[in-house]
Image (spheres, helix red, strand yellow):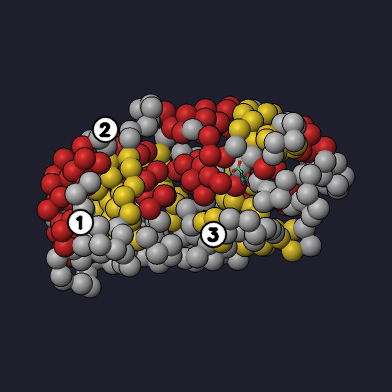
Amino acid sequence: MVIGLGGTIAMTQTGGGGVTPTLSARDLVDAVPGLADAGIDVNVLSLRNRPGASLTSEDILELAETLTEHFADGVAGAVITQGTDTIEETAYLLDLIHTGPKPIVVTGAMRNPTLAGADGPANLLAAVTVAASPQARELGCVVVLADEIHAAARVRKRHSMSTAAFVSPTGGPLGYLAEGQPRILNRPSYRATLDLRLLRRPLPRVGIHIATFGDDGALLPILAGGLDGLVIAGFGVGHVPDTWVTHLEDAASRIPVVLASRTGAGFTATSTYGFPGSERDLLSRGLVPAGILDPYKARLLLQVTLASTGSHAGAVAAFTAMSRTDRTPPLTGPAAPYRETVTR
Ligand code: ASP
């Protein structure tokens, strides 16, 4: 099943004022050389035609419901075509609520179809091949561009224009396509999902605030006052200016506050530094470490854990469990609403 949401892959010139999404999922599939002869039975559906920036959480939750119906009807795998601007977030949201073994593959294009060397058709062919492959089962949602297969939980868009914009800075890609065939080299050992039907909608309001040099933190109480949850994109392993500490402690007493890194790769620390505003200091004041998750993915995980548990303590427990990369250490605490998949 190929489902179109819009994005550069579907954009053409309409009135001389720049490209906009116009092509349907059928148009995209028909434009791929070799797809008709690949021996894969492809159905199409155009669900939205928007730039990636204007997709909403509700669009993705409705997409997840549509996918559940199609999987129940016997579809073996799904490909979503959409704007690359938000793929790193939409793919992770889908990953968090996709409980079955069938592959969901998200793809797009960096060059629109009117340009020389447009990458949409090659990406779509690769994505359909991965979605139809038994090798992609149990991987959850993956992102396929430029012949690389990335885990939704790790992929980042790290270049504004390059056709090689998508990377997995921590852990690397799950695999590649070689001569058109998927080769999975790194299978994640742990994945946790939430039942879509448990989510209260609309999703809670969770914001991100980035630590920046010389910021006195005066805006933090105003920001936190308007949110259900907050993610701090700290310096390095998870540090903020000492002037932020009491504001964050106060916020964390009322709403879940997650501590991530603004660096774009690596884990947040938990037990290294001891100064005011260090990761140890902030965690002792009630902040929750994001682990391997970047701030954008941490925000989504906090939204869905809040939406499914409905409580501060429940969201913190589910966030802590679901942001792990393996099953250790074993967790204690309130009964968790998430479902775990252990593949190794
Ligand atoms: N540049 C974006 C893309 O690659 C535009 C969008 O996200 O819609 O699709």
Name the quadrant containing residue 234: bottom left
- Name the quadrant where ligand 1 sits: top right
Q: Which residue is mark 1?
A: 216
In this rendering, which labeled residue sits more in front, label 3 or label 1? 1
Horizontally, is 339 left or right of 42 in the view?
Answer: left
* Label 3 neighbour load within 10 Å: few <14, some 14-19, many 20+: some
* Vertical position of residue 300 compared to residue 184: above or below: above
Q: Earlier in the sequence, mark 2 or mark 1?
A: 1
Q: Which residue is mark 2?
A: 310
Q: In this view of the protein, can residue 61 be seen by the observer? A: no
Q: Amino acid at mark 1?
A: Asp
Distance from the alpha carbon under mark 3 to that under mark 1? 29 Å
Horizontally, is 254 left or right of 31 in the view?
Answer: left
> Which element carries disc 2, helix, strand or loop?
loop
Nearer the observer, 59 or 331: 59
The image shows residue 37 at horizontal and vertical percentages of 87, 45
Name the quadrant containing residue 32: top right
